[in-house]
Amino acid sequence: MVQNATNKANNGKNIADEMIHGYEELNSSIVKTIDLIKDVENASKEQLAGIEQINNSVSELDQQTQSNASIANNTQQIALETDSIAKLVVTNANEKEFIGKNDVKAKNVSNNDHSLPISQKRAISEPLH
C-alpha cells in the first residue's frame, strides 16, 4: 500500500512537473506574443506618421496648385488686356497722320519663336496700316 501510494505520489509529481513545464512554455509564448503586438503597434504608429506627412504634402501641393491656377488666370487676363491696349494703340496710330507713317513696319517675328505667346506673335506680326 505504501508502495502504491508512493507510486501515485511520484506519478502526481511527474504530472505536476509536466504542467509546470507546460505553463512555462505557455508563459514564454505569451511573452513572445506581447512582443509581436508591441512591434505591430510601433509599425502602426510609424505608418500613421507617414500617412500624416503624405496628407500634409498633398494638402500643400493642392494649395500651391490652386495658387498657380489663380496666377495663370491673372496672367492670362493681363495678357489679354495688354493685347487689347496694343491693338488700340495701333488703331489710334493708324488713324493719325504723321511724317514717316508709311515707313513704319512691324517687327517681323517668325512663328517658330517659342519665347512669345501666340497672342503676342500675332500682334507683332500684324502689319501697321
Image: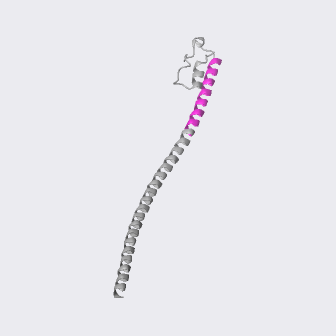
Q: Is residue 69 left or right of residue 6?
A: right
Q: Quadrant of the C terminus?
A: top right
What percent of the width, then of the height, locates residue 64? 52, 43
Name above or below for residue 115 compared with residue 27.
above
Residue 68 image-quadrant placement: top right
What is the count of numbered marks? 0
Q: Nearer the viewer, residue 106 or 23?
A: 23
Q: Magenta stretch: give its range.
A: 70-95
Name above or below for residue 83 compared with residue 95.
below
What's the magenta bit mostly, secondary-structure-wise?
Answer: helix
Residue at left offset 42%, top offset 61%:
36
What percent of the width, then of the height, locates residue 39? 41, 59
Would you say residue 53 sits in the magenta stretch?
A: no
Residue at left offset 54%, top offset 25%:
116
Q: Quadrant of the N terminus?
A: bottom left
What percent of the width, then of the height, locates residue 27? 39, 69
Name above or below for residue 122 compared with residue 8.
above
Q: Nearer the viewer, residue 72 or 41?
A: 41
Residue that extends furthest to the bottom in the rendered view of this protein: 1
In this figure, which colouring scheme has been used for the structure?
one colour
Name above or below for residue 10 compared with residue 26.
below
Q: Is residue 109 left or right of residue 32?
A: right
Residue at left offset 62%, top offset 19%:
93
Would you say residue 86 sits in the magenta stretch?
A: yes
What percent of the width, then of the height, locates residue 92? 63, 21
Q: Nearer the viewer, residue 107 or 114?
A: 114
Residue 2 image-quadrant placement: bottom left
Residue at left offset 40%, top offset 66%:
29
Q: Nearer the viewer, residue 37 or 124?
A: 37
